[in-house]
């Protein structure tokens, strides 16, 4: 079974600084995907970034990058130059495994990021 | 940019009543999902749907729940007899398909329906 662990319930960062949100995962699958989603206080789930298990390079999307260390089974999200609008809950999730015609996402418990001015 | 939409944004119902939550997935997507998030907790998978049938369901998705794609655009979740513990945010998601193999499909979420059961 797949499992996602986010050990930081809350993180604080100063505006314009970088922050790393931790995510470790457990799976016996060879092919899987790792995702980060942002959930602002308004409640929606916003897709941020994806990393495939076979991707050799770390994924980047604007100010977001994913520090993928396969041997350590970690997929940390790095947000550079934090902005006040980055304050939100951040969820790490994974998919993969046996082909079932669809792929469910397994989520971690989330990290609440607060950006201070 | 295409997006998943959900209605209503907030639904209040009495225990034992039936509710239908509606979703319009992204138009060219093939896979559809429902997730729920009880307040302050993590997001949990309920069911996935492809080619007009359920692909996978979790233990949460018992006989009180059903899903349907009544036409080419809508995707619904029905709870037949709501319980207090069904109070949660319900998210619909859709994805385009596993063109790249397992673990390559990105799911896009709707804004959610907050269900409150009194």
Image (cartoon, rainbow, N blue to C red):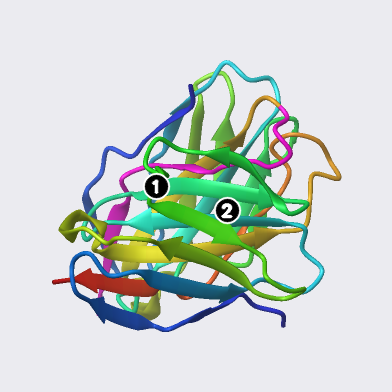
Secondary structure at badge 2 equals strand
Residue A59 percent coordinates (x, y): 67, 49
| Residue A26 visible here | yes
Q: CA distance from mark 2 to mark 1?
A: 25 Å
- Side of B58 where A109 appears, left or right: left
Which region shows up in magenta? A99-117
Residue at mark 2 shares a chain with residue at mark 1:
no
Disc 1 sits on a residue from what chain? B
Residue B32 percent coordinates (x, y): 64, 57
| Residue placed under numbered mark 1 in the picture | B44
Which mark, by number, is residue A65? 2
Query: Label 2 crowding class (10 Å Cα cut-off): few <14, some 14-19, many 20+?
Result: many
Residue B74 percent coordinates (x, y): 65, 74
Residue at (72, 83) in percent of width and height: B1
Which mark, by number, is residue A111? none
| Residue A16 visible here | no
Q: Is residue B40 above or below residue B72?
A: above
Q: Is residue A21 above or below residue B6?
A: above
Residue B24 is inside the magenta segment: no
Depth order, front residue of A54/B11:
B11
Instruction: Examine the image and state in which quarter residue B115 appears.
Output: bottom left
């Amino acid at each position: 079974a797949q499992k996602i662990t986010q050990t930081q319930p809350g993180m604080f960062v100063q505006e314009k600084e970088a922050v790393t949100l931790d995510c470790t995962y457990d799976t016996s699958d060879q092919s899987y995907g790792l995702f980060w989603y942002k959930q602002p206080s308004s409640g929606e789930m916003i897709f941020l970034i994806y990393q495939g298990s076979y991707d050799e390079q770390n994924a980047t999307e604007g100010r977001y990058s994913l520090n993928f260390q396969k041997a350590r089974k970690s997929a940390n999200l790095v947000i550079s130059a934090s902005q006040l609008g980055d304050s939100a809950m951040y969820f790490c999730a994974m998919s993969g495994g046996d082909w079932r015609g669809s792929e469910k996402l397994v989520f971690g418990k989330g990290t609440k990021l607060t950006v201070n001015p | 940019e295409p997006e998943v939409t959900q209605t209503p944004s907030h639904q209040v119902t009495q225990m034992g009543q039936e509710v239908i939550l509606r979703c319009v997935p992204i138009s060219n997507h093939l896979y559809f999902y429902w997730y729920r998030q009880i307040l302050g907790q993590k997001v949990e998978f309920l069911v996935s749907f492809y080619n007009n049938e359920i692909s996978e369901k979790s233990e949460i998705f018992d006989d009180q729940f059903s899903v349907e794609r009544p036409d080419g655009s809508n995707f619904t979740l029905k709870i037949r007899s709501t319980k207090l513990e069904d109070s949660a945010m319900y998210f619909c998601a859709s994805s385009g398909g596993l063109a790249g193999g397992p673990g390559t499909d990105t799911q896009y979420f709707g804004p959610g329906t907050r269900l409150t059961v009194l």
